[in-house]
Image (tube, grey):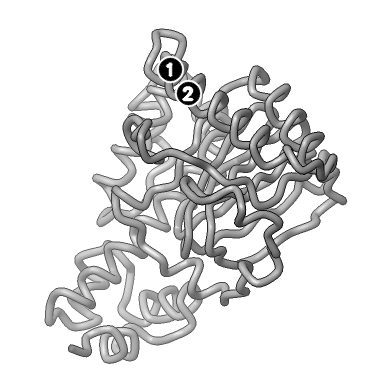
Amino acid sequence: MLHGTPDKDEFHPIVHYANRLECKPGEHFGPRIISDYQWLFVQRGAGMVRIGSHRYRAQAGSLFCYGPGMPHSIQADMKEPFVLYGLHFTPSGYLSDMPYDLRGTIIAVSEEQLLTCELTDQELPFYIQCGMWPLPFFEGLVEEYNREHKMSPMLLRGIITQLVALLFRWVHSKAYAVSPLDRLVESVKEQLMQKAEQAYDPSWLKQWTSYSSDYISRLFKERVGLAPHAYHLDKKLQAAKRLLEQTDLSSTDIAEKLAFGSVHYFCKWFKRFTGEQPMKYRERTRIL
């Protein structure tokens, strides 16, 4: 249900839990996995949402949805912690399944599991910057959930079904137009990925856009959650991992291919970000 249009004949959602949380400065949840689906809607404030190896800068109007088994973590900003609406649900089920014990569905995972999780296209989390129009629906979900009336499960199903229908209509309408700045950031991301094997050059940003490097850096970090240099390093790390996993190149050859000054620096850099030497990583991952 995260990609494309949900099947109307199979979408009979069951709300497990709904709440509104005013986070404390720096408050965080996870890394963890859950056994159902969760929506997060940011009413105000800011923070960071990490889902697998993907990072998102969350702000007012951000909406996230991720499913069972997706490692994720959530951290509020220190200066302007966000206010979140959280909704746990399953896309289909019986109303008699209520009430639902949420405690058994949340499992802690390690930071390494979060960082090394590579999501496929089908597993990529649903994220949009949709503005504040969904707020009344999340307010209604929390209010009805807390009412605990015998008809609440049916009413909760009605509210979330209406929200999903309006959300998909909104996403596929002309109202969901990507802004020029969003397209600019996506273009910079693509070019940084293409240059992952080269040494980072700050002048790239000015070459690729009509804006100053400082402005593009701020814009990029605001939308991606990482500065351009850090994003480029992340892609270089992924390239190094692929070369270790898929080729027989030596550490010296990989260091040269990825434009490191020396194999010593490459090995030290790789261990800093992964916790192990390149050849140890190859030995651990290349097991049938």
Q: How crowded is mark 1: few (under 14 residues within 10 Å), some or many (20 or more)?
A: some
Which quadrant of the structure image shows residue 4?
top left
Asked which secondary structure carries label 1, the reply is helix
> In this rendering, is residue 78 above or below 117?
above
> In this rendering, is residue 141 above or below 22?
above
In the rendered view, does 222 fall on the left or right side of 149? left
Q: Which residue is drawn at 59% across and 48% down?
A: 95
Name the foreground residue: 286 vs 7: 7
- What quarter of the picture does the C terminus occupy? bottom left
Mark 1, mark 2: which one is toward the viewer?
Answer: 2
Q: Residue at x 71, y 61 (%)?
A: 29
> In this rendering, is residue 123 above or below 143?
below
Name the foreground residue: 41 vs 37: 37
From the top left corner, tell me how far across and down residue 202 is, in percent: 43, 40
From the top left corner, tell me how far across and down residue 225 is, in percent: 56, 44
Task: Check contact, mark 1 vs mark 2: CB within 8 A.
Answer: yes
Q: Residue under circle 1?
A: 169
Which quadrant of the structure image shows residue 192?
top left
**Amino acid bearing label 2:** Ala
Q: Residue at x 29, y 38 (%)?
A: 191
From the top left corner, tell me how far across and down residue 135 is, in percent: 71, 24
Question: Which residue appears farthest toward the top when viewing the image?
Answer: 174
**Amino acid bearing label 1:** Arg
From the top left corner, tell me how far across and down residue 281 is, in percent: 33, 85
**Dot label at residue 165:** 2
